[in-house]
């Protein structure tokens, strides 16, 4: 049986993920149909794909069209369908009706959904559709974020999984992370639970101070609130809502959305796309920050905390363990916030081994998605810079955080861990 | 002493895709990572290191920081008093540092020398960086007031080939495409996730504009931040090291031969001087043949692969006939026949070279040697040339002004 993927259909190619994933596929000389509601939408996606590749020649492998004119023939031609239309259950189900009508048997269907349950999406579909249906969750922008989580339903044929895994790994150069079919998969589950905890601190400490304290020096390319501005507060709210709905444990309480975020969403302060979220840049070029109590913007205070500045200076010189020693030994409410968030990150990540990824992967799958999906330092690397397992457990105990069973030793500095120090940015 | 053996014990390369300026890190942080990584990969004891040499071109210009050898002293308490120097020869600085280390060992000064090649380049604007790199040419005559002097000069190298022998630019596009393709297999290569195809490299477009003359963006190597640390050792030290690690000393690669020449710095003078001769860059040819002779290598076909300087596609085009893969001016034939590709008779730049892997100027020569080591010890992973036993490196400074060739093997 020839399992090679020669022709791909991207549904929703006017969107960012659809067009950029479609572009990555075309970069390998594979024919891709860019389909959208309108031809102009598909062409917008094509332009985005060319910008990502920094080349016009990939357009030779891309054919643009709208659903009414090209869907039927394109689906009949496809070996793989990437569905990336809007995150709306009914819209996706209506699209799947059309896909079911025209697709060839054995064509794999991957959805890029980050929040809708796979079982609901597959509900009512034919056995052949369901056995070829899985989630291919890419991270944005896929040109820079190499993670792709793949989740199967109970009906997914393992052969479909193997074919898509090989395709993602070998053709699209993805870090493929096999994840369980759980809300938020691995990456969004960990990141957004953490984001929610961080947003709950904003009312007391202010947005600017929180992003300063939990800044890039703690092991992330971008501070957390700035990341939420990039994602969009409306999307953030929807992801938190979906995670909460699916929670049956203590997470339910922890996933309560702070009320001021609802107010920001209602007021239209959605982040970068509305030119104002937690951050806003004035015409003068000055940066101002949301006041969660009034939903007005307030001037920057330019925080300066001694242990933070010390840690940044040490990271600037490549002294990562010394930087975390400075954080660990610091006292005061600001230091407690930083240590709380670091503890939460490692404890939660290790506690999810087996729940979001297969137990035999250990922390490796979670490490992979947090680095290549978010550009965060991996949980295992945080344990390493804190001084290894025993030191990390001491820190967790001191904060009353439950120590997860699977926490690894992580006390040896490997070449891989050394390379991961790139996620600690001296800012 | 002349006949004493010099062994290579391996080392570590930083990920050349990183932007250390965006990480807000000091050039010494890059050196520190390369050093720490080399300890992990080689299991060398810091207290065994007798001296250190830094290959670096222009730390003063890019980073306002010279005297790089002194930074090592802070890397380990046992380094207090360690003899260190920084070696400079433009883009050949890394190879010159290794050559100096080799001389130390052959002279019996030291038994174990650490070499760190390093350059930080992404912290300045492209035009400023181009101006700084112009100091590797005769700045007053060839670079002052010129936006990108080196693409212009290496474009002229292509023009000279065209004049003497004829040159179809599609072969330059093929050289680019092969280097990018190889880089995809190298987890430390700068361009490993970039798109490239022959069609793209062979097409002038909005994203592949002409930089100067016949040089397009795809003909150029990269602006790269990176560091490489590696170790050269005497036979005495290597014997003890092999015993400690349970290795046979015969399985540890040696530098079998070397060549080092310097041509006049001005490009035009080189071209005038070589008129009527067999080779356009006779001093590059001499560095190669000197290395062959010292290594007892009859010709290039005794090699298993080459890591060559390819700051531009024209540079690699020149290296192909100068290494003797073809007669002078016939490099196109080796490209057309697939000889230089992975799987070909004599692969060039399995790592991706300066075009694909990246070109942190002062680190490149050290990176080439480390890649040669990986090939000879079958640890090159996905870019391994099967059963490689002898590998040549060619590191060039300026417009083929300083030329250093090594043959590494067992």
Image (tube, coloured by chain):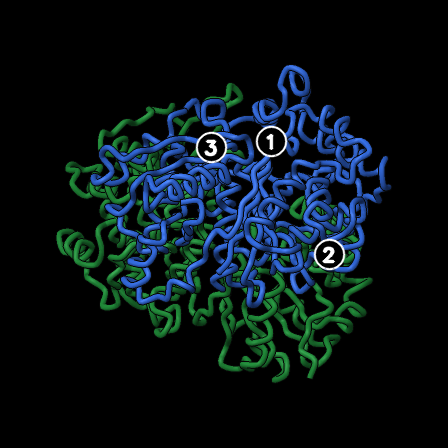
Q: Where is residue A35 in the image (x, y as percent from the top left)?
A: 73, 59
**A272 displayed left or right of B217:** left
- List x then y, in percent, for residue B231: 39, 48
| Vertical placement of residue A177 versus A315, above or below | below
Q: Do labels 2 and 1 share a chain?
A: no
Kind of element beneath mark 1: strand
Chain shown blue: that is: B
Report the chain holding disc 1: B
Q: Residue at x 86, y 35 (%)?
A: B163
What tint does the image give chain A? green
Dot 3 falls on a residue whose secondary structure is loop
Residue assigned mark 3: B56
Chain letter for mark 2 = A
Q: Is residue A48 visible?
A: no
Query: Mark 2 sits on what residue?
Result: A37
From this viewpoint, is residue A307 visible?
Answer: yes
Which quarter of the figure is the N terminus of chain B placed in?
top left
Are labels 2 and 3 assigned to the same chain? Answer: no
Q: Is residue A57 left or right of residue A236?
A: right
Rendered location of residue A180, percent (x, y):
43, 71
State the CA–CA distance, disc 2 to disc 1.
64 Å
């Amino acid at each position: 049986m020839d399992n090679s993927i020669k022709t791909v259909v991207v549904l929703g190619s006017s969107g960012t993920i659809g067009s950029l994933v479609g572009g990555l596929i075309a970069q390998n000389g594979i024919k891709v149909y860019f389909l959208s509601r309108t031809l102009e939408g598909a062409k917008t996606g094509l332009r985005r794909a060319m910008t990502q590749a920094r080349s016009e020649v990939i357009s030779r492998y891309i054919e643009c069209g709208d659903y009414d004119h090209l869907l039927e023939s394109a689906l009949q031609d496809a070996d793989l369908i990437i569905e990336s239309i809007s995150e709306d259950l009914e819209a996706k189900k209506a699209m799947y009706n059309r896909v079911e009508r025209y697709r060839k048997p054995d064509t794999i269907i991957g959805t890029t959904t980050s929040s809708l349950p796979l079982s609901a999406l597959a509900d009512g579909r034919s056995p052949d559709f369901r056995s070829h249906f899985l989630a291919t969750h890419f991270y944005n922008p896929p040109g820079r974020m190499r993670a792709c989580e793949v989740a199967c339903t109970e009906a997914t044929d393992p052969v479909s999984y193997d074919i898509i895994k090989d395709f993602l790994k070998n053709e699209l150069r993805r870090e493929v992370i096999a994840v369980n079919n759980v809300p938020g998969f691995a990456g969004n589950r960990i990141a957004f639970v953490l984001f929610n905890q961080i947003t709950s601190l904003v009312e007391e400490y202010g947005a600017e101070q929180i992003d300063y304290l939990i800044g890039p020096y703690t092991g992330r390319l971008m501070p957390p609130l700035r990341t939420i501005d990039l994602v969009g507060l409306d999307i953030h709210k929807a992801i938190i809502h979906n995670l909460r709905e699916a929670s049956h444990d203590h997470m339910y309480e922890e996933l309560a959305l702070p009320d001021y975020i609802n107010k920001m969403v209602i007021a239209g302060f959605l982040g970068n796309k509305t030119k104002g979220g937690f951050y806003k840049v004035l015409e003068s070029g000055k940066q101002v920050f949301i006041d969660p109590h009034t939903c007005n913007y307030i001037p920057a205070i330019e925080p300066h905390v001694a242990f933070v500045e010390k840690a940044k200076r040490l990271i600037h010189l490549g002294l990562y363990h010394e930087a975390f020693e400075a954080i660990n030994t610091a006292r005061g409410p600001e230091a407690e916030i930083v240590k709380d968030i670091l503890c939460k990150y490692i404890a939660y990540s290790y506690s999810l081994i087996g729940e979001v990824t297969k137990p035999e992967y250990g922390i490796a799958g979670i490490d992979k998605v947090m680095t290549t999906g978010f550009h965060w330092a991996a949980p295992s690397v945080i344990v390493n810079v804190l001084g290894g397992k025993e030191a990390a457990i001491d820190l967790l105990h001191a904060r009353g955080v439950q120590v997860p069973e699977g926490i690894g030793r992580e006390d040896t500095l490997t070449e891989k861990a050394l390379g991961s120090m790139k996620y600690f940015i001296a800012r | 002493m002349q006949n004493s053996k010099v062994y290579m014990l391996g080392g570590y390369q930083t990920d050349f895709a990183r932007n250390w300026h965006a990480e807000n890190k000091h050039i010494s942080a890059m050196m520190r990572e390369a050093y720490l990584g080399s300890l992990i990969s080689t299991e060398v004891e810091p207290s065994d290191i007798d001296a250190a040499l830094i290959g670096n071109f222009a730390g003063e210009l890019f980073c306002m920081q010279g005297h790089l050898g002194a930074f090592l002293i802070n890397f380990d308490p046992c380094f207090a008093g360690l003899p260190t120097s920084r070696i400079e020869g433009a883009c050949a600085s890394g190879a010159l540092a290794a050559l100096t280390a080799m001389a130390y060992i052959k002279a019996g000064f030291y038994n174990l020398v650490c070499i760190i090649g390093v350059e930080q380049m992404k912290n300045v604007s492209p035009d400023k960086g181009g101006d700084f790199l112009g100091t590797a040419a005769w700045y007053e005559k060839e670079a002052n007031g010129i936006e990108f002097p080196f693409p212009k000069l290496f474009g002229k190298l292509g023009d000279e080939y065209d004049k003497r022998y004829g040159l179809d630019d599609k072969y330059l596009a093929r050289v680019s495409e092969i280097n990018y393709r190889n880089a995809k297999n190298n987890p430390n290569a700068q361009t490993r996730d970039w798109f490239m195809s022959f069609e793209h490299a062979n097409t002038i477009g909005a994203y592949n504009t002409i930089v100067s003359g016949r040089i397009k963006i795809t003909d150029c190597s990269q602006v790269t931040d990176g560091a490489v640390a590696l170790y050269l050792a005497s036979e005495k030290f290597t014997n003890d090291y092999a015993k400690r690690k349970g290795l046979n000393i015969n399985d540890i690669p040696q530098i079998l031969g070397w060549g080092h020449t310097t041509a006049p710095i001005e490009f035009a003078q080189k071209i005038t001087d070589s008129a009527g001769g067999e080779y356009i860059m006779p001093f590059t040819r001499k560095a190669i043949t000197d290395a062959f002779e010292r290594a007892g290598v009859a010709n290039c076909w005794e090699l298993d692969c080459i890591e060559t300087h390819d700051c531009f596609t024209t540079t690699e085009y020149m290296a192909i006939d100068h290494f003797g893969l073809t007669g002078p001016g016939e490099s196109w034939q080796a490209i057309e026949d697939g000889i230089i590709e992975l799987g070909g008779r004599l692969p060039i730049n399995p790592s991706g070279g300066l075009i694909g892997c990246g070109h942190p100027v002062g680190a490149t020569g050290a990176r080439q040697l480390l890649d040669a080591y990986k090939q000879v010890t079958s640890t090159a992973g996905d870019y391994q040339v099967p059963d490689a036993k002898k590998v040549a490196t060619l590191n060039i400074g300026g417009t083929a002004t300083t030329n250093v060739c090594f043959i590494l093997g067992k």
